[in-house]
Image (cartoon, grey):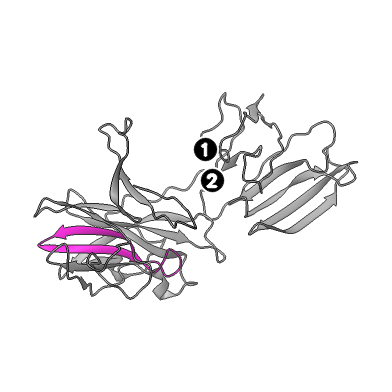
Amino acid sequence: MTRWTYDPVARVWPRVWFISSEDLFNWSDPVWAEPWGIDPELFQDPVTKKTYLNLMAPNNNKDRLWGIAQSRPEGPKMYYKDGWYYLLIAEGGTDQLHRSTIARSKTPSGPFVAGPHNPLLYNGQWGFDNLTVQSTGHATLTKTNDGLWYATFLARRNINGSSPLGRETFMVNVDWKDEWPVFNQGDPVLLSRQIKPEVGPRQVPRQWVDDFSRAKLDSSWYQLRVPYTKNYKLEKGKLVLKPNVFGLSDRDTPAALLRKQKSLNMTFSAELSSFKGDLGPRNKIGISSYLSEFQHQDIGIRGCVNATSICLYTELNKNGTQEVIVSEKKPQYT
């Protein structure tokens, strides 16, 4: 594990530390290691019985195992198979050029020779706009008890030029040809393709509804950061939010409950119960498509500027700037 300390003056890199547990609940205190960098990986050599720690950022040329053509190598993982040491890395950054490549050597320290099927993963070679799955990389190899090989990796599902779900975990089959791995038979990663052996048809996602009738809030809801005091309650099948002075653009804890988007295409709606009285010009109630305090789009009601009635509003915050506000009077609201 690494701990990132950002200091623009000292430029401190992450330090590596380890914790251990026998039951997944009672963890030891951190044990700090001397090496620094990101993406640490432990490899226990079955030949020498030594354990190697792979890091992305060596501070000398002696420990640099494998030079590559693409930029930003990261996530090194080492495997031993049939007398070869395989070094699997990610490169190209984490956006559209993200990919996985491999090299091998007869010793853990090299020299390494790049594989003939590189890149093992790179959907961008078929065009950034042609396939839904993009930014494929950061792979990990796994062998099952029955001798089958798979690779898990990170990728994004794109829609309308963006990936609202962020990086997700994918899996493909791995075959070995002339002692080199081949991912997904060399084909692009498609959502319509299932890994083998197939485990049956995919389940259709069920519609999710929360009527707030339970005694406790569903665990899929969460709040931004840690509230100073509890700012919601469940009351007779309704969710009651207690307003505070913070908004969604503040780096604090507004009176808001959020739920993570689960599907690439989805609809969301909420029913607002009637209430007595008016809202002040700075009071808002509504729903939001929220990424961060810098990126969110909101729709709801608020007090009009003249504080005599209630107005509908939509608001787009992009890169920390409030770009679009549409507000209209809605006196017939009840």
Magenta span contains residue 168: no
Give percent across and percent down for residue 317.
68, 56
Q: In the image shown, does 174 or 44 lie closer to the viewer?
A: 44
Q: Is residue 21 above or below residue 182?
A: above
Give percent across and percent down for residue 89.
30, 63
Residue 218: which quarter of the image?
A: top right
- Magenta highlight range: 74-98
Which residue is found at the position 12% from the left and 66% from the top? 106
Q: Is residue 175 left or right of residue 332?
A: left
SS class, disc 1: loop
Can you identify the residue that label 1 sits on?
Answer: 220
Q: In this view, does 48 lie above or below 62?
A: above
Give percent across and percent down for residue 311.
83, 46
Q: In this view, does 285 lie to the left or right of 330?
A: left
Q: Is residue 193 left or right of residue 132?
A: left
Disc 2 marks a residue whose amino acid type is Lys
Q: Is residue 329 above or below residue 119?
A: above
Can you identify the residue that label 2 sits on?
Answer: 260
Q: Which mark is residue 145?
A: none
Secondary structure mainly formed by the magenta segment: strand
Disc 1 marks a residue whose amino acid type is Ser
Give the class, few, some or many, for how many residues have Cα within 10 Å of label 1's Cα (few <14, many ≥20).
Answer: few
Marks 2 and 1, how far apart at CA: 8 Å
Which residue is found at the position 48% from the left and 54% from the top? 7
Magenta span contains residue 92: yes
Give percent across and percent down for residue 183.
28, 65
Given contact means CB atoms under 8 Å apart, are the residues at marks 2 and 1 in contact?
yes
Q: In the image shown, does 149 or 45 lie closer to the viewer?
A: 45
